Amino acid sequence: MAEGERQPPPDSLEEAPPATQNFIIPKKEIHTVPDMGKWKRSQAIEKLVALLNTLDRWIDETPPVDQPSRFGNKAYRTWYAKLDEEAENLVATVVPTHLAAAVPEVAVYLKESVGNSTRIDYGTGHEAAFAAFLCCLCKIGVLRVDDQIAIVFKVFNRYLEVMRKLQKTYRMEPAGSQGVWGLDDFQFLPFIWGSSQLIDHPYLEPRHFVDEKAVNENHKDYMFLECILFITEMKTGPFAEHSNQLWNISAVPSWSKVNQGLIRMYKAECLEKFPVIQHFKFGSLLPIHPVTSG
């Protein structure tokens, strides 16, 4: 340091620990391989997975009822009523007490993310509500940038499992489905995130997702292939006939091009469609502010 230059006082070189900090002697916590879960995932991720596990358990506790109609089992309304009643309590298990004021607002997106209890249907608008639920938790600081991989492949993947169970158990109708011309009856986002997961894969190419053997061998590791497996379990007949859009996508040469195309398609078919966005709700965390011209 040049002579005559003033040195900062010692106390300003680093922040003092908070006055309420309780210091402890560090100790080992990772004793076995399963303990790596403590290191790899935040408490918020684990609490969100536990929340979704609760929704899953409620399905088991609310079996379908006998009814003349094959689709839209009315037991779903009983299941949904329980969520409607308990949503804020569930969200409060994830949100720390000093952020408790945010719970009612965030809980709305959780309730919106599981389908419609009047029509007993589910679609991409409900899926978008769960993405909004996760976004709100990011905005209030419950989820962090470090959690981003786990948000998709732990939390969102568990959400998908629960939604598929809902769809199968209560024979839910697809909301706003385009039939054979749509990407999928129920989901869209896992195809975007799933295709990004496969970019630069050493041997799996887009053409492989219509190969039954490739799907069966790899679906547990790749979100996109898990989506394909679910479709083939739910639909009968040639893949090219019941899922024509996906069949066409299998001819795209690379996963990066698939991913880019799906993002454009999601914007056009979901985010810019009135029948989808008319149901989306806005609040202080996700406000609607018109863009100013200029």
Image: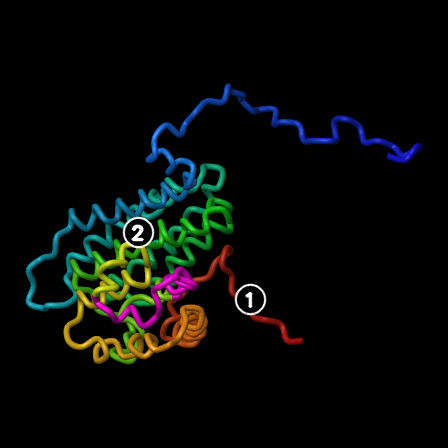
What element does badge 2 sit on? helix
111 versus 120 height, above or below? above
14 versus 147 height, above or below? above
Q: Which residue is mark 1?
A: 289
Say which quadrant the N terminus sits in. top right
Q: Residue furthest right?
A: 4
Residue 53 quadrant: top left
Q: Position of residue 152 (x, y in %)?
A: 39, 54
Mark 1 Cα within 10 Å, few/some/many (few <14, many 20+)? few
Mark 2 Cα within 10 Å, few/some/many (few <14, many 20+)? some
Left or right placement of residue 3 versus residue 93 in this view:
right
Residue range of the region highlighted in magenta in the rendering: 192-212
What's the residue type where badge 2 is placed? Arg
Left or right placement of residue 142 versus residue 75 in this view:
right
Q: Is residue 168 visible?
A: yes
Residue for point 36% across, 45% down: 48
Q: Are marks 2 and 1 in contact (CB under 8 Å)?
A: no
Residue for point 34% across, 30% down: 32
Q: Residue furthest front?
A: 203
Q: Is residue 125 visible?
A: no
The answer to if 34 sits in the magenta stretch is: no
Q: Which residue is mark 2?
A: 158
124 versus 22 height, above or below? below
The answer to if 211 sits in the magenta stretch is: yes
Say which quadrant the C terminus sits in. bottom right
44 versus 117 height, above or below? above
